[in-house]
Amino acid sequence: MNERETLKINGKGHLELGGADCVELAEKFGTPLYLFDEAYIRKMMRVYRDTLEKQYGGNGLVLYASKAFSCKAIYRIADEENIGVDVVSGGELYTALQAGFPAEKIYMHGNNKLDYEIGEALDAGIGCIVADAYSEIDKIDAESAKRGICQKILLRINPGVEAHTHAFVQTATTDSKFGFSVADGTAEAVTAYAMKKNNVRLEGYHCHIGSQIFEKESFVIAVEKCMDFAADMREKLGFELKTLNLGGGYGVWYTDEDRKIPAEGYAEYIEALLEKVKEKAKEKEMRLPYLLIEPGRSIVGEAGVTLYTVGRIKDIPGVKKYVAIDGGMFDNPRYALYESKYTPVLANRAAEEPTEIVTIAGKCCESGDIIAANVALPKAETGDILAVLSTGAYNYSMAMNYNRNMIPPCVLVSQGQAEYIVLPQSYADLTRNDVIPARLKKKTK
């Protein structure tokens, strides 16, 4: 386990997060339970914000990629830390607005924004929409005309950079549902198309090469390709780049197979991008663009810990030992999706050395309902509290009610204080929207 100031083993041998004993949190709030370390979230937001401020003169904005974890509290924290957010649905937009987040610092993404979502974004007066299709540009233009406004847009482009990551989370290759390819000329064609519209104002380009990327070189190459393309569009079309959004995708620690980057270490990624932007701008005699970056996973990923209670234990001699928990793929589907790896710890016996290899199984009626396969633990017993580390990103946001299981609540922890930021679901919540047609209703005698 990688310890830090706010994640450590306390004097009782228990896992501690944000100054609170995880065993005591499990007793107070129940399990399964998502925990979020507020201090770590704020620290990561500040690392990105301060680096952009110091190394680029503040000519840009950090956007928290809220698809990683969206709730009202996270938007309040982002606002307090003076950063922006990006949203990818009407639901995320609504949540941010309900939290009082300033609309002008909201950017909207998505390869298939629905018509009503575009309308909601325009009505809210959000800062910018990242366009991903010709028909979407048409729709934004038409709806903006109805409202008597001119909406700022970016075009999502694919520079053709293949980052070393899982194929499911690569997004900047030519064969992608996202964006317009630079290599085949479609990015140039759509630039010319957008420039002709009356009620959209093309500000620049957006590029996101993928997720869970550790090597800086992929990001730097993407910057180089985007700046070269922008310079080419200036020569061919007379388009002057004003804004460049370089996306996110910075890797985080899940297991010891991953490189552990201290919070401050992420500044090096941004510094490398900034240096390349400055270098290319000077080389191409371009003005420095307003720069956007979109960290999500790296802000909340390692801030999250999920707590479970150990239930049945099944030891199949010579085959495998299963340790079942009271959660599963309904609160973390990432193993089922692409066999994502995690580090589990017995929170009530965190100081003990591992003695066996086990597989953590969920309670859903699916053979693939696994949280972690072939991991080292002390000999687990029914009633132990199991903590799975680095679950802050894409766990709650992907959670579901499969098998009519309830999505766990979320608790924010800071300096020993723990408070709900998402309340627990109830059985009533599960059936709230169910309707029985009159012809199916139970007949009374």
Image: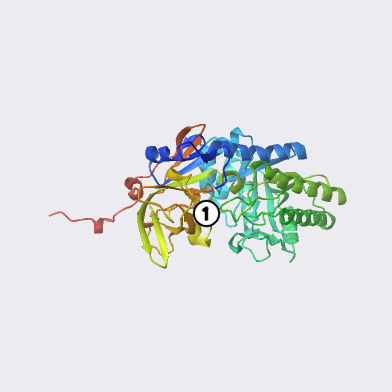
Residue positioned most to the bottom: 318
Instruction: Look at the numbered disc 1 and give the secondary structure of its residue.
Output: loop
Left or right: residue 251 versus residue 435 is right
Q: Quadrant of residue 83?
A: top right
Q: Position of residue 327 (x, y in %)?
A: 40, 52
Left or right: residue 21 versus residue 38 is left
**Residue named by callout 1:** 342
Q: Position of residue 358 (x, y in %)?
A: 44, 59
Asked if residue 181 can be seen in this view, the reply is: yes
Q: Is residue 346 above or below residue 105?
A: below
- For the rendered model, the colour scheme is rainbow
Task: Name the quarter where the C terminus is drawn.
Answer: bottom left
Q: Position of residue 73 (x, y in %)?
A: 51, 37
Please tell me which residue is depicted at 59% across the width and 37% down the height of the picture.
Answer: 42
Please tell me which residue is depicted at 53% across the width and 57% down the height of the picture.
Answer: 341
Asked if residue 365 can be seen in this view, the reply is: no
Residue positioned most to the left: 445
